[in-house]
Amino acid sequence: MLKTTLERLERNLSWSVLKSVWSRNYCMSSGIPRERVECVVIGAGVVGLSVARELALRGRQVLVLDSAPTFGTATSSRNSEVIHAGIYYPPNSLKAIFCVRGRDLLYKYCSQRQIPHKQIGKLIVATGSSEIQKLHNLLDRGIKNGVDGLVMMEGSEAMRMEPELRCLKALLSPVSGIVDTHSLMLSLVGEAENCGTIFCYNTTVIGGHIEQNQLCLHISQTKHLEMCNGNSPLQPEIVLIPKFVVNSAGLSAPALAKRFDGLQSAVIPTAHYARGCYFTLSNTGICPFKHLIYPIPEDGGLGVHVTLDLNGQVKFGPNVDWIDGIDDISSFLNKFDYSVCTSHMKHFYPEIKKYYPNLKDESLEPGYAGIRPKLSGPRQSPVDFVIQGEDIHGITGLVNLFGIESPGLTSSMAIAEHIATKFFRC
Ligand SMILES: Cc1cc2nc3c(=O)[nH]c(=O)nc-3n(C[C@H](O)[C@H](O)[C@H](O)COP(=O)(O)OP(=O)(O)OC[C@H]3O[C@@H](n4cnc5c(N)ncnc54)[C@H](O)[C@@H]3O)c2cc1C
C-alpha cells in the first residue's frame, strides 16, 4: 500500500513530492540534502526521453530532470519533424550510422503505436548546372551510408511528379518522411513511466562535483533560478549522487558540463548556435507539393526547404542565422531568442523561387524558430555528434551528449540504444 502511494506520488512530478519522498534519507551534514539514485537523465527532449525509455525497459531505475514545466519544450518542438534518410552525413560518422538505424527504429515504433507519421519521400533538387555534381556526390554518399531506394532523376521526370517544381535534376529519397514529434514524445514518456521512470519537471541541474570519481549533481528548483539576480553564487537545494548520468541538456549540455567541477574542461567542445526560422504559406489551403522538397545543402544547414506537416501545413525553412550564446542560467531556462524576424522574409522568397517559381509575393507568414546546438561555427566544417563516456573523460557513469543537432530527432532511438548498450553494461 505504502509502495503504491509512493509510486503514485512520485508520478505527480512535483519538486515538493520528490523532496518529501526523499526526506527520509536526507544526510544533513553539509546542510544540503543528498540522495543516491541509479540513473539520472538530464533533459526531457526527444533524445533524453528515448534514453530514459530505453534504460527503463532494460530494468534501470531512471529519474528524468528538466528545468521546464513539461517535456519537449526546447529544440525537440522546434524543428522540421522530418524523418531523414541518412544521405548527407560522412560515411561511418555517428550522424550517418544513427540516422539510418534511428530512422528504421522510428518508423517501426510509430507504426506499432499508431503515432502519426508518413513516409512521403523527398526530392533534393539541383536548380543550377553547378549543383548537378553536388547532387551526384549526395547520391554516392547516400549509397555509402546504406540508404535504400535513392533514384537520380531528370528534371522533367521530377517535375511530372511535382508540377509546381522547377529543377534540372532531382534525387528522390523514398524513405524520407514526417512524424508528429509531440505524439512521439508523449508515447516515450508514457512507456518510460510505465516502466517506473520518474519525471521531475521545473527542476534544474545547476552543476556538479566529483566525489570518488563519480559525478554528484547540484539541483535547484527552476522557480528559484528565475528569481536569481546573478550576483550571489548558486546554492543547490539537493545533491543527487547517481550511479549513471546522461547529460542530454541539448543547447545547454556543454555549458552544464563546464559546471561539473572536476571534469576536464579540455574535453568539453565549444558550443555554437544557429537559429533557423520557418515561414508558413498563407491564404492558400492548397498544398503545392506532395513530397518534401530540399535544395542543395548550405553552410550550417540543409537549405530553405519545403516541409509538410501531418495537418497539411506547408512550412519553408529553416535558414541559418548564427547567434551568440547566452549566460548559463538563461540557457538552462531556455531563454534563447526564438523570435522570427520578418526581415528574413526577403531572403526566403528568392531562395524558394529557385525551385518554386509560382510562389506568390506576400504569401509567407512568420512561423516559428528553433536553434541548432552546433559544435562548428560559420564556415567551419560540420562536426559529428559527440557522445562521451568514461573512456573519454574518465568520470565513472557519466555520458555527455554534445552537438545533437539534425538528424537528432531521427537518430534519437538509435542514440538511446547505443548508450544503453555501450555505457550501461554493469
Ligand atoms: C531548426 C531545426 C530543425 C531541425 N529539423 C530536424 C529534422 O527535421 N529531423 C531531425 O531528425 N532532426 C531535426 N533537428 C534536430 C532535432 O530537433 C534535435 O536534434 C533534437 O530535438 C534534440 O533533442 P534533445 O533531446 O537532445 O534536446 P532538446 O529538445 O533541446 O532537450 C533538452 C532538454 O534539456 C532541458 N535542459 C536544459 N538545460 C537543463 C538543465 N540545466 N537542467 C535540467 N534540464 C535542462 C531543456 O529544458 C530541454 O527540455 C532540427 C533542429 C533544429 C534546430
Image (cartoon, rainbow, N blue to C red):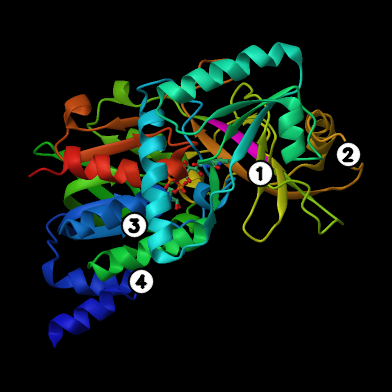
Mark nearer the viewer, 1 or 3 = 1
Q: Is mark 3 within 8 Å of ligand 1?
A: yes
Q: Earlier in the sequence, mark 2 or mark 3?
A: 3
Identify the image quadrant of the C terminus. top left
Of circles 4 and 2, the one toward us is 2
Mark 2: which amino acid? Answer: Asn
Kind of residue indicated by mark 4: Ser
Quadrant where the N terminus is found in the figure: bottom left
- The magenta span reads 273-277
SS assignment at label 1: loop
In the displayed structure, 343 sits above or below 41; it is above
Asked whether residue 275 is drawn in magenta, I would say yes
Mark 1, residue position: 291
Between marks 2 and 3 in the image, the one whose residue lies nearer the viewer: 2
Q: Determine if residue 54 is in view.
A: yes
What whole-number distance in Å separates the C-alpha atoms at marks 2 and 1?
A: 17 Å
Residue named by callout 3? 65
Residue 384, horizontal then vertical, whole percent: 41, 25
**Residue shown at the point (30%, 45%) measured from the top left:** 416
Three-letter amino acid code of the residue under disc 3? Leu
Query: Disc number at residue 358?
Result: 2
